[in-house]
Image: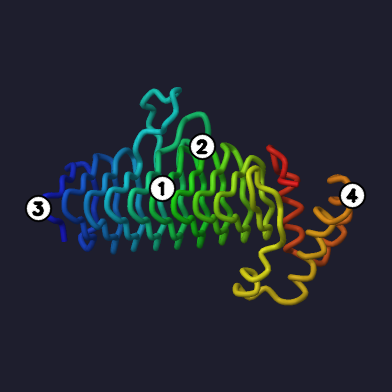
């Protein structure tokens, strides 16, 4: 299961049923779980933990030093969950001591070619990042979010669960849950209606999300006044409650 040209440090831990392809380089402190497949020419370094059943395609770099000039070789880490697909030339850098000390990728994510995930990013579960998506440092991506090709996300931005960004979106502020964003700089376009229907959201939930969206983006209300009315909606809608909590915790403010 390990190709003879692969280089694996004796201090690395690789599951017995993992497949390590030609010319992969696995450094000390790396842990690779059961069922993982590293196709070829994959470099994994630093204190990196990769869970079960992940597939990593050629020329990806996982766990390398952060691209942060303040980094002084502190022991930080990269944590990747289970069932992820990481395509060609993806780069995922380890964290820094200025934040979480870790870059974290959840479960069942689809990370397409040339995606960059910088230091201290946190990516949830079931996300899709299309080709050439770039996450600057400290970015948080919620579950089920979809980022279109060439999406660029400014450092410290947060993208809510089930959000959607169009191709070439330039995100400089936070995107609330369920919202579709487009443009440079990105602005809200609609709710992710089709995506939510596919994931089983019922009519009442969709209606509540749509009403909250209209309060935020289609009314003449200030953000504070819109939030007051959304809080009333949230009493009967967990989805609107999720939007309210996201906006209340936003540090960069939301696209609007």
Q: Kindly identify the residue that appears in the image at 40 percent across and 44 percent down.
A: 92
Query: Mark 3 falls on what kind of element?
Result: loop
For the N terminus, give its image quadrant.
bottom left
Q: Nearer the viewer, mark 2 or mark 4?
A: 4
Drawn side of residue 188 relative to residue 220, left or right: left
Q: Quadrant of residue 207?
A: bottom right
Q: Nearer the viewer, residue 83 or 221?
A: 221
Q: Does 187 sit left or right of 68 as displayed? A: right
Distance in Å between CA atoms under marks 1 and 4: 42 Å
Q: Quadrant of residue 243?
A: bottom right
Q: CA distance from mark 3 to mark 4?
A: 65 Å
Which residue, given by chain and number where applicable, does mark 2 sit on? Answer: 137
Tell me which label, 3 or 4, sits earlier in the chain. Answer: 3
149 is higher (above) or lower (below) than 97: below
Q: Nearer the viewer, residue 141 or 115?
A: 115
Residue 74 quadrant:
top left
Using the numbered discs, state the Cα–Cα distance from disc 3 to disc 1 in whole angstroms: 27 Å
Task: Assign a secondary structure to mark 2.
Answer: loop
Instruction: Report whether 226 appears left or right of 5.
Output: right
Residue at (34, 45) in percent of width and height = 62
Disc 4 target residue: 221
- Point out which mark residue 79 bears: 1
Pointer 3 or 2: first along the chain = 3
Q: Is residue 212 left or right of residue 112?
A: right
Badge 3, how many Cα within 10 Å: few under 14, some, many 20+?
few
Q: Which mark is residue 4?
A: 3
Return the x and y of residue 164 as percentages of the image width and height.
61, 58
Which one is earlier in the sequence, the residue at label 1 or at label 4? 1
């Amino acid at each position: 299961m390990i190709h003879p040209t692969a280089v694996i440090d004796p201090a690395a831990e690789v599951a017995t049923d993992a497949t390590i392809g030609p010319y992969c380089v696995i450094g000390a402190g790396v842990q690779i779980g059961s069922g993982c497949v590293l196709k070829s020419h994959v470099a994994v370094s630093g204190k990196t933990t990769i869970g079960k059943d992940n597939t990593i395609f050629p020329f990806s770099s996982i766990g390398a030093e952060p691209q942060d000039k303040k980094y002084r070789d502190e022991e930080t880490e990269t944590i990747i969950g289970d069932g992820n697909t990481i395509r060609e030339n993806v780069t995922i850098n380890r964290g820094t001591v200025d934040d979480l000390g870790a870059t974290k990728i959840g479960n069942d994510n689809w990370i397409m070619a040339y995606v960059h995930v910088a230091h201290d990013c946190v990516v949830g579960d079931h996300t899709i990042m299309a080709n050439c998506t770039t996450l600057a440092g400290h970015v948080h991506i919620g579950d089920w979010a979809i980022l279109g090709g060439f999406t660029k996300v400014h450092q410290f931005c947060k993208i809510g669960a089930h959000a959607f960004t169009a191709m070439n979106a330039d995100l400089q502020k936070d995107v609330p849950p369920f919202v579709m964003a487009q443009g440079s700089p990105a602005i809200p376009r609609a709710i992710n209606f089709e995506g939510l229907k596919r994931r089983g959201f019922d009519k009442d939930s969709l209606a509540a999300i749509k009403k909250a969206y209209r309060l935020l983006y289609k009314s003449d209300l200030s953000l504070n006044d819109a939030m007051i009315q959304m809080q009333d909606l949230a009493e009967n809608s967990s989805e609107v409650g999720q939007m309210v909590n996201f906006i209340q915790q936003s540090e960069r403010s939301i696209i609007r």
